[in-house]
Image (cartoon, rainbow, N blue to C red):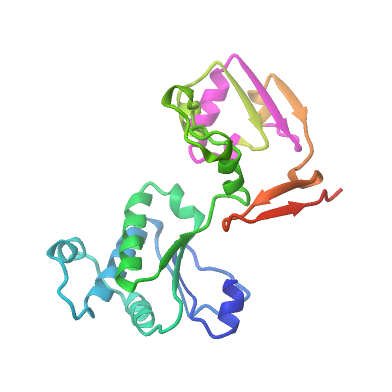
C-alpha cells in the first residue's frame, strides 16, 4: 500500500537507524545513529511546534529545548506541514525492541497529535495478531481475553532470566533470535532438561539440548494468518 501511494504521488519519508531500500521513491531517507533516534524525533516535534500559531504549552518547549533541528529534520517538518491529504505515521517493528522504545513512542504520539494524523505500527512477525487472538501470549487467553494474574505465564525474557529447570525451544535459534541471547544461552546451559524442535540442524543447540526433534517449516503446512488489519489470510502448504 505504501508503494502504491508513492507511485501515485504520495511523499514517503523514512527516519531510522538505517536507510530503507525500497522499490518506490522515498523523498527523505534519513539514517541516524540508533542512540539518536529519540533525539531526532524530539527535534521533529520542535520543528513542527516552531510553526504553530497557537500558544505552545511550556512543558513542550522545555522537553524539546535541547533538540537540534538538522536540515533533514527541517525538510521533513516542512513536508509534513504542507500535506493536504491523508497522512499517516507508521512505526516499524524494530522500534519496540529498543531500550528507549517508550520515549520514541511518546514523541511519535506527540507528532500524531500535532499533525492530527493517525499513528500506526507494524507488528513483530506476520501473525502477531493471530498469536494474541488465539491466546498464545503469556497474559491472554483464547480470543485475547486477559488472564487473571495467577494464570499468567512468563514471556521469553522472563523465562530465560528465571533460569528454569527445563525449556522447550520451538522454531527459533536462541543465540540468533533472542534480544538478550547471552541470557538465553546461559539459562539453557544450566537447565536440567531441554528439548529443541526445529526444521534445521544446529550445532549450537547440541551444546544445550538433551533432545533434538525435527519439524516441518511454517509454510510446509496449511494454516491461517491474521494480519495487522485483523483480516484472516489462508496459506496453503508450499510442499
Residue in the image at 76% along x and 52% along y: 235
- Left of 28 or right of it: where is 207? right
**Is residue 211 shown above or below 232?**
above
**Is residue 148 shown above or below 73?**
above
Total tally of numbered discs in the picture? 0
Q: Which residues are magenta?
A: 174-203
**Image position, residue 68 (x, y; %):** 25, 69
Q: Residue lying furthest left in this view?
A: 58
**Image position, residue 30 (x, y; %):** 43, 71
Magenta residue check for 180: yes
207 or 198: nearer the viewer: 198
User: Can residue 36 be seen by looking at this rendering?
Assistant: no
**Is residue 8 shown above or below 87?**
below
157 or 202: nearer the viewer: 157
User: Can residue 236 be seen by looking at this rendering?
Assistant: yes
- Left of 137 or right of it: where is 208? right
Residue in the image at 57% along x and 56% along y: 228
199 or 151: nearer the viewer: 151
Q: Name the quarter where the N terminus is drawn.
A: bottom right
Residue in the image at 32% along x and 56% along y: 106
Q: Residue lying furthest right in this view?
A: 239
Magenta residue check for 184: yes
**Image position, residue 13 (x, y; %):** 46, 74
Amino acid at each position: 500500500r505504501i508503494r502504491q501511494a508513492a507511485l501515485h504521488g504520495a511523499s514517503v519519508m523514512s527516519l531510522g537507524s538505517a536507510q530503507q531500500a525500497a522499490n518506490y521513491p522515498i523523498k527523505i531517507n534519513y539514517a541516524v545513529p540508533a542512540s539518536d533516534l529519540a533525539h531526532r524525533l524530539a527535534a521533529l516535534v520542535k520543528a513542527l511546534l516552531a510553526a504553530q500559531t497557537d500558544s505552545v504549552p511550556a512543558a513542550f518547549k522545555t522537553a524539546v529545548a535541547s533538540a537540534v533541528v538538522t536540515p533533514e529534520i527541517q525538510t521533513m517538518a516542512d513536508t509534513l506541514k504542507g500535506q493536504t491529504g491523508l497522512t499517516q505515521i507508521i512505526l516499524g517493528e524494530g522500534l519496540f525492541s529498543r531500550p528507549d522504545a517508550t520515549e520514541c513512542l511518546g514523541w511519535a504520539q506527540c507528532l500524531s497529535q500535532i499533525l492530527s494524523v493517525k499513528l500506526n505500527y507494524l507488528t513483530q512477525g506476520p501473525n502477531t495478531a493471530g498469536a494474541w487472538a488465539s491466546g498464545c501470549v503469556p497474559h491472554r487467553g483464547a480470543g485475547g481475553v486477559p488472564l487473571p494474574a495467577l494464570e499468567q505465564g512468563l514471556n521469553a525474557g522472563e523465562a530465560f532470566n528465571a533460569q528454569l529447570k527445563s525449556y522447550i525451544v520451538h522454531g527459533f535459534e536462541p543465540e540468533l533470535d533472542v534480544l538478550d541471547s547471552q541470557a538465553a544461552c546461559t539459562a539453557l546451559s544450566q537447565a536440567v532438561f531441554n528439548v529443541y524442535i526445529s526444521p534445521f540442524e544446529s550445532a549450537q543447540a547440541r551444546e544445550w539440548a538433551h533432545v533434538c526433534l525435527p519439524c516441518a517449516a511454517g509454510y510446509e503446512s496449511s494454516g491461517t494468518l491474521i494480519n495487522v488489519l485483523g483480516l484472516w489470510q489462508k496459506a496453503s502448504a508450499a510442499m
